[in-house]
Amino acid sequence: MKPINTAEDIVPLADFKARTSELFRQLKEGRRPLIITQNGKPAAVVITPEDFDRLQERERFVEAVSSGLDDSETGRLVEDEALERELNDELDTSS
């Protein structure tokens, strides 16, 4: 996702309604978020489905790393050998 271009990417709601197809095409080609304003204030941000998926994936990754760091700090760790045994036992019983 590219940075916002304030001259092109901030659009009043009335303009968005009147130019929806054009703005969606611009959104897809420009790969920049579109900010919709209502009464002069930001009301919504429109992004492509691909950018939305990337943001969700990034959020899941950050949450997983944070959870792992929390586990490490509180001592909730499993030694490599114990994990390998546990995985082998699980795989052997599910066959």
Image (cartoon, rainbow, N blue to C red):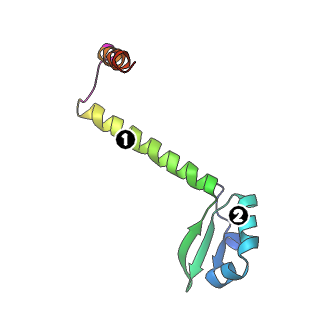
Disc 2 marks which residue?
Answer: 27
Instruction: Please indicate whether residue 42 sits to the left or right of residue 80 in the image.
Output: right
Foreground of the two, 40 or 88: 88
Q: Is residue 79 magenta?
A: yes
As helix, strand or loop, the secondary structure at mark 1 comes to: helix
Residue 62, percent across and down? 44, 43
Considering only vertical position in the picture, is 16 above or below 63? below
Q: Which mark identifies residue 22? A: none
Give the amino acid type for the residue marked by disc 2 in the picture. Leu
Hey, which quadrant is residue 95 in on the image? Answer: top left
Q: Is residue 24 magenta?
A: no
Residue 74, percent across and down? 23, 34
The 10 Å Cα crowd at callout 1, few under 14, some 14 to 19, many 20 or more, is few
**Marked residue nearer the N-terminal end (2 or 1):** 2
> How many numbered dots are placed on residues in this image?
2
Give the amino acid type for the residue marked by disc 1 in the picture. Ser
Foreground of the two, 72 or 5: 72
Residue 5, percent across and down? 68, 66
Residue at x 57%, y 51% (from the top left corner): 53
Disc 1 marks which residue?
Answer: 66
Instruction: Please indicate whether residue 66 sits to the left or right of residue 78 in the image.
Output: right
Q: Which residues are magenta?
A: 76-81
